[in-house]
Amino acid sequence: MVCLKLSLGVISDSINALFLPKTSVPNIIILSKENFLILLSLRSGTTIAILKKSTEEVKKILKIEINKSFRSKTILIAAGFDNGLIQIWKMNILKSSIVCVILKGHIFPINALKFDFHRQNFFSACKSGNLVFWDLKKKIGIFKIKKAHQGKINILCLTRKVVGKLKFLLSFGEDNYIRFWDLKTGFCLKTLTSPFNKILNIEFFWKENSLIFFNDVGTLAFYGIKKFFSFYLLKKISTTFGFKNSNLFLNKNQSFLFVFGKNNFVDIFILKKKSPSFQAKSHKIKNPTKKPKLFLKKFTHFFVSKIKGIDVWENKFGKNNFLIVHYFSNFIDLYKIQKKKNSKKKHKILLIQIFRTKIESNPSDVRELIWFSNDFFIVSLYGLAKKIYVWFLNSQKCSQIIPIFSSGICMNLSGKNQIILGNKKGSIELFNLETGILVLSKSKAHIGPIWAIDLLKNFFKVISGGADGMLKIWDYELNEIKISKYLYLRDQILSLKIFFNKNLIIISSLTSKILFFLLDSLQFSFSLQGHSLPIMSMDLHCDLSLIATGSADNFLKIWDLKNKLIRKSLNYHGSAITAVIFQKSTGNIFSASRCGKICFWSKNNYKLLSELKNYHLGPIWTLKISSNGNFLASGSQDKKLIIWKINEENFEENFLKPQKNNEDQSDFIKNLPQQKKIKKKLDFFESFESFFFRKTFEKKKQIKFSDENLNILNFFAKIEDKEWEIFLETKKTKIVFFFLNLVFKKIKSDQRLDLFYFLEKFIYFLKLAEKKKIASLDVVYFKKIKRDIKKFLFGIKEKLVKNLNLMNLVKKKLVKKKSDLPDSN
């Protein structure tokens, strides 16, 4: 019902941008946004696709691994999360299809991932030292090796002893041991102690059948592999890096080796074998047929900023290498790697800059959001960073950055292209969004922070409330802002709303009361009390005369202004509710809490329609709905700005989400025959609705359960005639018709059932619906099931006629044969 549309200005702090392989041009990159991935175009900066989580359990991405093999058409992208889950997206660029697979085999955070493109296997390691072998075809685990290392496993690498297929998996852990594992049996074949105190990375160099070790001192060591996993040193070379955060990167063609750290330069090595003739001339070796040695040439390139990470793109033939450099300042540079020889036949590497772009990121926590210009733009206020960003949603780029003089707290739209805000120092400022110029400013409007601000757009009046307990009404013109009226309250004003139709100002303060004052005279009208702690957020629905309030006591309350009573009190969040808003078109309610959870409530019965968890990792400060009511924007303390798509009302909205304390569906079916006397008609209908919702909900998630058909048919068979009348009186026949259609499909698919017994119940209900003239409410469903039954009966009739004809033919043939037989006399 509510799904993630896009995320603005959110980038992972630990994972750098990576190329999408197997593309014709190096234009698409993969960006990690904490708990989901996006495919971004480098040239235009637009989002091509969002690879989001398909379960609510996953939280934060810690590791990404991409299968860059050209042997298959599909692209495999694996993401390891901090709760042990692994998600693999299978992408087919030609068919434009994306399939997601979830692998559950770990409990602790994922530390290392590795693809084996020859066998279509996958390997994962976690913080506790467990190692799992996966079969990607069957989507199951092959082996799980508990405590493969003492402590977390940092590195996984595929190796081989002799030139041929990959046969062994290398793992290195915190215990400083190197272990070799057989891919077929999962047994440990060899355990070696590390030649260094701490290894940062290990790569397999298949051209020389050797391992490349990179340690924390900045030394590169090449070790050749002999039989029985014995090693010999080929070459040792020192780099300019000696830090814990340094890393090693080897491109797929293994022609370049990159060493980089958290600074502004990269060491690039050319990997090549010396020819025997060259060795004989230069080193005067008598035996020129000796095996060629490894040739390394080092080049150091300096960049403009500190490097977050790098990646290399190359085509199928290993040519046209491109380098992407991702900086901590969120700039991305695209370089073309050229290898040349000078007049002395010495190799030289040139990096030619092709393109430079910036990935816009949120500088601090998102305090307030505003939709404007027909929902094409959204304005975000960053309090700690003292900035305002204007985002253009079509391109998902920041079109304007407006610096402000103090930490902004609240903001509202004034006119078509102006915003008015209140800041931490108590000043009111008016900005032009197109030019970014400060139009008006009123310093020291309040003593202390301004927590809430609202305005009467037609009358050029601003109402503000702050920590000083003052409620002030301002008149603003072209050149200045003047105070018109003010009212002193003892407690801080946390939020306020103007109910212009009733001439009221609604205020919530630290007293946990809702206060109502007359707009023209500021006289006290009445108050509402129901919360035990201060009200942190509030929203007003003028058409329905309803107020929704969220408090620090974890309660969401809906108030009826006509009767001045609480209509509903909800306690579901488990933490302080920080943002509340009505969907103006439908009257449904969104609420957000300090734990980062968003809930979507129905306006009719105030039951939970949807729940969004683990997207925000901190308190949500603001919720805003677009003018057309189709999108929701949320901003939180974790520097995330997320746009949600609110789907239109569909058939699923008729089903209520079952509560946690509901009985099990099997118990409900067993107790169904005992429910002969129904005191309340709605109770039985709600239980029916709850049962049916579970079936459709499980079907949507594609969970296979064995006794689904039996449960549904048992439920249908035990419904009595009186209970059908109850369903018709509830006037929710759409659900019943849909349920009958589902049962009818299951009856047709199972030939062992007594068809005529079930058809009697169908025909009885259809006649009853026609008799009470209720079928006209849902003509489409009624006609559909009637048409299906007629087709089914017509098919049975045709089969019976064919069988009768066959029987007659058989009888005639038997009679002829008897007449042809000679008489026994």
Image (tube, helix red, strand yellow):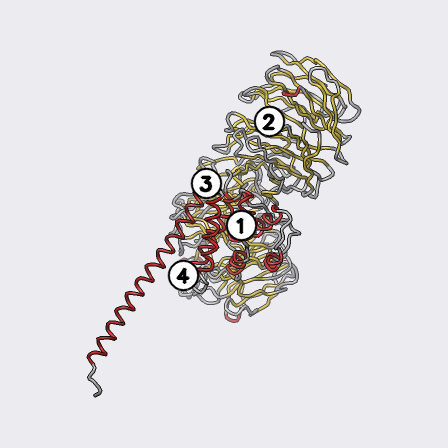
Q: Residue under label 2, please give it.
A: 543
Q: Quadrant of residue 186?
A: bottom right
Residue at (59% x, 60% y) in the render: 172
Q: Residue under label 3, please give it.
A: 776
Where residue 234 appears, x then y in whole percent?
Answer: 51, 61
Which one is earlier in the sequence, the residue at label 3 or at label 2?
A: 2
CA–CA distance in space, label 3 to label 2: 31 Å
CA–CA distance in space, label 1 to label 3: 17 Å
Where residue 440 appears, x then y in whole percent?
Answer: 63, 16
CA–CA distance in space, label 4 to label 2: 88 Å
Say whether residue 789 is visible. Answer: yes
In the image as oriented, which residue stretches furthest toward the right?
490
Residue at (64% x, 20% y) in the render: 429
Q: Residue under label 1, please give it.
A: 724
Q: Are marks 3 and 2 in contact (CB under 8 Å)?
A: no
Q: Quadrant of the C terminus?
A: bottom left
For marks 4 and 2, give the one nearer the viewer: 2
Q: Residue under label 4, please give it.
A: 276
Nearer the observer, 402 or 240: 402
Q: Which mark is residue 664?
A: none
Per the image, label 4 sits on a secondary structure element best described as helix
Which one is earlier in the sequence, the residue at label 1 or at label 3?
A: 1
Residue type at mark 2? Asp
Which one is earlier in the sequence, the residue at label 4 or at label 3?
A: 4
Nearer the observer, 84 or 174: 84
Nearer the observer, 609 or 107: 609
Residue type at mark 1? Trp
In the image as oriented, which residue stretches furthest toward the bottom?
825
Q: Count all numbered tags in the image, as a single digit.
A: 4
In the image as oriented, which residue stretches furthest toward the front?
825
